[in-house]
Image (tube, rainbow, N blue to C red):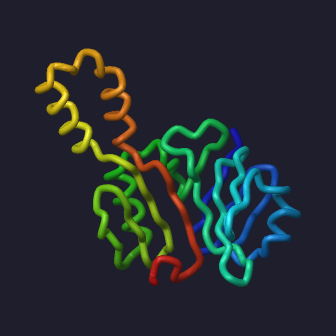
Amino acid sequence: MKKIEFIPLVGIHIEDLGRVPFGMDQAQVQEFLGAPSDALDGQYYYDELELRLDFNDLGQLEFIESINGPYPQKTEVSIYGVNPFQVEADELLHILSEKNSGPVDDAEAGYCYAFLNSSVGVWRQMTVEDIQEDIEAIKAEGEYEENVDMLLEDLEKAKFFWTIGIGVEGYYAD
């Protein structure tokens, strides 16, 4: 697995490749990482690195996101010395809050948080509470046994965030 260190406000460091800093233009990124697996409207996707890179209107790198959590297949991501996909959501929020030392946009609390000073964002589609509610509803419908494997898998997945991204200073301020 390729190790990728997320360095807030700076960029990423990819094992055996080096640093990809914010501000690189699209040509520099392609020269360094090769052609993207897919490119859409200012975004590059690198499937082998399980990354999405976003560029601003000037074509400069402004945001990097690990998109295959909480169970990446090809990469091992770290931020502040921890793997964000191996640390449960509440603990990760505590770590990110401490390092942020400032305001957090929690308008979508439970699912999405943006740490405004450090320009770090995390997201997940469902929470443990969501799955527990689903379990109760499915039990009430008498369909628990036929759905138990999927529900338990979702319950485990819901303990973690599914993506983590870092941006340039002020990325989440807008």
| Residue depicted at 31% across the width and 52% down the height | 90
How many numbered marks are there?
0
> Residue reaching furthest right?
31
Image quarter for residue 7? bottom right
| Residue depicted at 37% across the width and 61% down the height | 112
Say which quadrant the N terminus sits in: top right
Q: Is residue 9 left or right of residue 143?
A: right
Q: Nearer the viewer, residue 54 or 118?
A: 54
Q: Position of residue 54 (x, y in %)?
A: 64, 68
49, above or below 103, in the image: above
Q: Nearer the viewer, residue 52 or 16?
A: 52
Q: Position of residue 136 (x, y in %)?
A: 15, 32
Image quarter for residue 128? top left
Q: Position of residue 115 (x, y in %)?
A: 42, 71
Q: Is residue 17 left or right of residue 127?
A: right
| Residue depicted at 80% across the width and 66% down the height | 29
| Residue depicted at 88% across the width and 63% down the height | 31
96, above or below 46, in the image: below
> Residue reaching furthest top?
145
Q: Position of residue 3 (x, y in %)?
A: 68, 47
